[in-house]
Image (cartoon, coloured by chain):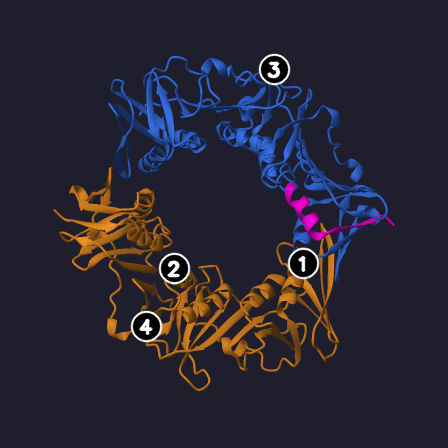
Chain colours: A blue, B orange
Amino acid sequence: MSFFEIHKSELVKGLSLVQGITGRRTTLPILSHLYMEWKKDGLFLTATDLETGIQETLKAEVFEEGKASVSAKKLYEIVRELPEGVIQIRKKENHWINLQCEKSVFNLVGLDPEEFPSFPSFQEKLFSYISGPTLKEMIEKTAFAASNEESRYHIHGILFIQQKVNGKEGLRLVATDGHRLSLIDRECSPIKGIEKGVLLPKKGVLEIKKVLGETEEDKEVGIYFNQTHGFFKIGPSLMAIRLIEGEYPEYEQVIPRDNDKIIKIEKERFYGSLRRISTMASERLEGIKLSFKRNLLELSSFHQDFGDAKEELDVLYEGPPMEVGFNARYLLDALQVMDTSFIYMELKDEGSPCTLRPETSKLPSDQLCIVMPMRI
Amino acid sequence: MSFFEIHKSELVKGLSLVQGITGRRTTLPILSHLYMEWKKDGLFLTATDLETGIQETLKAEVFEEGKASVSAKKLYEIVRELPEGVIQIRKKENHWINLQCEKSVFNLVGLDPEEFPSFPSFQEKLFSYISGPTLKEMIEKTAFAASNEESRYHIHGILFIQQKVNGKEGLRLVATDGHRLSLIDRECSPIKGIEKGVLLPKKGVLEIKKVLGETEEDKEVGIYFNQTHGFFKIGPSLMAIRLIEGEYPEYEQVIPRDNDKIIKIEKERFYGSLRRISTMASERLEGIKLSFKRNLLELSSFHQDFGDAKEELDVLYEGPPMEVGFNARYLLDALQVMDTSFIYMELKDEGSPCTLRPETSKLPSDQLCIVMPMRI
């Protein structure tokens, strides 16, 4: 009879990683399921929402090979509650599975595993490797700026493109929602398929970050792209994310080249001031006003129902007086992904895009945020 | 000019305690406000939802007495973001207030403080004292069983009634939602106004627990009841909770006196089994089946869409075989408020209420949960 044994903690680990992907799309019942296949070399769990697929390889003792498809959520609920110990899973009739652990016995309804969408095929030899923490950093510092609206598919995507960094090979990530943009460059060995740039959906990219967060920090991540998918190999997890088709905005044209008003600001103080002043910005637009004077920044806001707020901040600025309105949330988001004690804010006038970059960043930039001003 | 100074941490502490009460009822705009009154002996913050009122006494340096009424939520949002330090608050025209802290200046819209509902009057000399941890324990072990439906006002209430405990004066709390009941008795000095029992709304009682949770654990709590309100003095907080009018169900008649099937069960194991088996109970009713045999309990469940579950548990039981259905949630809730390693479950038959009590509890009981069975 087809069955295998697996330790509870190993199965919980695998199941927790796939929960974010299953059940997102409820139109096809099988997408709320896991595909489980147990072979001589272990248990393979597969989940997909047809856009992002994940495959986990888990340690298991397999007595006879088999496969099944069961509810991912229900299986996770059950396995989490089991005592620490060995779980025995066996295939039954009508695609059911039987699960035993100590004195607990569960019979779980299944669907025909052959109906589960197949995992995109990939070639082991095409993977290049990039440091896990670097990839995680790059995602954290860009993904926030991508649009959350799936229907605006091209700016819901995050651009992965080949980029020289200090004359060496590297990777650039770019995200924008039309109001702000974030860009980061990091050195890494050449990655196949990104010469002209590829677009990955924000949701899928955030899943990569989640899986990266649950593996050991210093691992290398395998990565490559073919015509239809990006593949990411992270420890025992393999992710396949469907590329977004379509043209990405010509982001390089958006990067300001002649912002000559340069302000150097202590990052934490700026962040605190923005948090305070934004409490009095209107909920929807979160508009605040920045007034730059010689070595002084005055932040102010006004709320129709609640009142007004004002604060002064010492900065380094030698230019002429200037007033610019911003969405405070965009500035806060940008500051949050900068690691230096000081940042540079560069402006042209009250109607042109402003750039923010960490103190250490070189121009054009290894990290850059662009924020459009708003009329206050 | 009327103004006072207060340390940020002191004001944040006071504001956080009143947030749960303001803004619950949005029909009257002033109920989303705080009433602030600064006198020679400090700052007094008052908030109310017309059912539960709270008054905080905070340390402040008052330069000239005054009062104001401002949005509780907005003031909290602002003050939380201020740097650690001294905040200066002054009264302005049209009921506005001005708030300054270091280089931040806020002007906050206010309403006429005279329009704020007055705090129920109370008499300091009527308070009796009960240990804070004891009151917190009594609330935690009963309130969960009260109905969440405010419209079912009598069982949304929690009964506070005088009760002899081991021949000494004491307090009893009782809560029920019609399907289960929880009761606890604890010794304490006599409390004024509870001779015949009074009913406090669940929401107000949970606010008491919250405030108790944020003060030092070992403090004494002042408590008394008049015709309309219960008063609770907890450190610098004074709460006034409007009593529910109406008759409480005759709960003493519900307590089974002839449950002769007595099962002694290891609590943690029973809890774990119930958690596992309830994963296969239907979502709405959470029905599971308990089958008692000689020194053995079999738990089982069945879910139309997902399958079935079964588990065996060693227990101490000498009676005849018996099968009873329960809502697993009710049993889990009851076990969660019992502190002993073993509990007693006492039954009569498959249609009569069952009692659960900690191993150490004496009959009739210092702690008791009653759960109605259900047909499975």
Between circles 2 and 4, the one closer to the viewer is 2
Residue B340 location in percent, x, y?
A: 57, 72
Residue occupying the far right of the picture: A1
**Above or below — where is A136 with respect to B326?**
above
Q: Count every numbered label the image shows and give the total.
A: 4
Inspect this view and state whether residue B1 appears: yes
Tell me which label, 1 or 4, sits earlier in the chain.
Answer: 4
Give me the C-alpha separation between circle 1 and circle 4. 44 Å
Q: Any magenta on residue A52?
A: no
Mark 2 falls within which chain? B
Label 3: how many Cα within 10 Å (few below 14, some 14–19, many 20+) = few
Distance of label 2 from label 1 (alpha carbons): 34 Å
Q: How far is mark 1 from mark 3, CA to CA?
A: 52 Å
Q: Position of residue A222 (x, y in %)?
A: 67, 29
Disc 1 and disc 3 in contact, CB within 8 angstroms: no
Element carrying mark 3:
loop
The residue located at (75%, 45%) in the rendering is A59
Magenta span: A1-17
Residue A38 vertical position relative to residue A51 in the rendered view, above or below: below
Return the residue at label 2.
B214
- Whole-Å distance between the Cαs marked 2 and 4? 21 Å
Q: Amino acid at mark 4?
A: Tyr
Q: On residue B276, which mark appears?
A: 1
Judging depth in this view, the residue of B42 and A367 nearest the camera is A367
The residue singled out by tag 3 in the image is A196
Which one is earlier in the sequence, the residue at label 2 or at label 4? Answer: 2
- Residue B224's tag is 4
B165 sits to left or right of B349: left
Query: Could you tell me residue A158's position as x and y percent?
Result: 56, 25
Q: Which residue is at a point 33% across and 76% down the rendered structure image?
A: B193
The answer to whether the residue labelled 1 contacts the one labelled 4, judged by CB atoms less than 8 Å apart, is no
